[in-house]
Image (tube, helix red, strand yellow):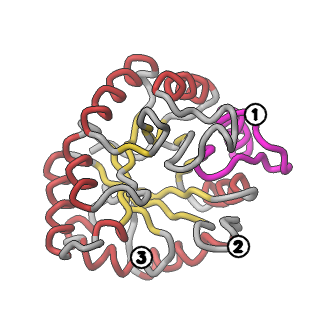
Amino acid sequence: MTGLPRLMVAPNGARRTKADHPALPMTLPEIIETARACAAEGADGLHLHLRDAEGRHLLDAGRYREALAEIGAAAPDMAVQVTTEAAGRYGAAHQRRVALDSGADLVSVALREMVVETPDATATAFYEDCAARGIAVQHILYDPADFDLLARLLPDALLRARELQLIYVLGRYSRDQESDPADLAPFLERMQAEELAPDWAVCAFGRSETACLVEAHRRGGKLRVGFENSLWQSDGRVAADNAARVREVRDSIG
C-alpha cells in the first residue's frame, strides 16, 4: 500500500477560485503546470481536487482517471492523492463510489462525512473494501474527538495496522480558520493515549501554516501545504504561487 508523501501540495481545494488568488489552478492543465513547479521545489505528492466547466468542485471517477494519467505522464515521480470531499455537493454513497472507482492508490476521506445518513456498518465495509483493493485511505481528523469516530468505524486490524494514514487539520473550525502550532499537541496526546502509530500528516489553515508545519515536522509528521489551506508566507505576504509555499516550507524544515 502506498505510503504518504513527505511533502504534499494541496494547490486549490474545493472552494477558492482565481478571485482569491490569480495563480490558483482550476483547470487540469493549470493543475499539471502547478504539479511540475511544486515538484521542482521538493513536493513529492499532490492532493488533487478537480473542477467542472463552471469552476465548481467535482467528484467524478472518470475525470479522476483521466487526470491521474495526465499528471502521471507530466510528473511521474509525484504521488497523487484524490479527495472525496463533499463540499456540500455530494453524499456519502457517491463519495465512496468515487474513492473505489477513481483508480487512485491514495484517497483522503473525512470520517465525519462517511457517517452522514449512513449506517456505521456501511462505512466500515467501505474502509475494508479499500484495504482489500490496496487503496490507502488518509482519514481526516478535524479535532481529537474524531479519534472516537476512527475507533468506532475501523476494525481493529485496520486501526492498528502500520499502514494507517491520518491527517490532523489545524485551525479549520477555530479563530476564523487561523491555526496555531499549539493546536497539534492535543492530537498527538490522543494518538499516544490510543497507542496508535500511524503514518500521519498535518495541514493548517491561515497565516501560521508554515509555523504549524515546521512543528509537525519536528514532531515526526509529514506535511501538506498549499493554497487550499493558506495563501500566505510566514512573513504575512501573500505567496506568489503554490511553488513559493512549497519552497518556504522545504527551506524551513531543512
Residue 210 point in image, percent of width and height = 71, 52
Q: Which residue is mark 2?
A: 175
Task: Check the image and report above or below for 119 versus 83.
Answer: below
> What residue is shown at x 68% (from left), y 44% (from top)?
20
Secondary element under disc 3, as helix, strand or loop, is helix
Instruction: Report the Cα–Cα distance between label 1 and label 2.
Output: 25 Å
Any part of residue 28 in sight: yes
Magenta region: which residues? 225-254
Q: Name the residue tied to disc 3.
A: 146
Image location of residue 72, percent across then percent down = 38, 23
Nearest the eye: 90 or 238: 90
Q: Amino acid at mark 2?
A: Arg
What is the three-letter code of the residue carrying label 1?
Ala
Q: Disc 1 versus disc 3: distance between alpha carbons?
A: 34 Å
Q: Nearer the viewer, mark 1 or mark 3?
A: 1
Q: CA distance from mark 2 to mark 3?
A: 19 Å
Asked if disc 2 and disc 3 are in contact, CB closer than 8 Å, the reply is no
Tag 3: residue type? Asp
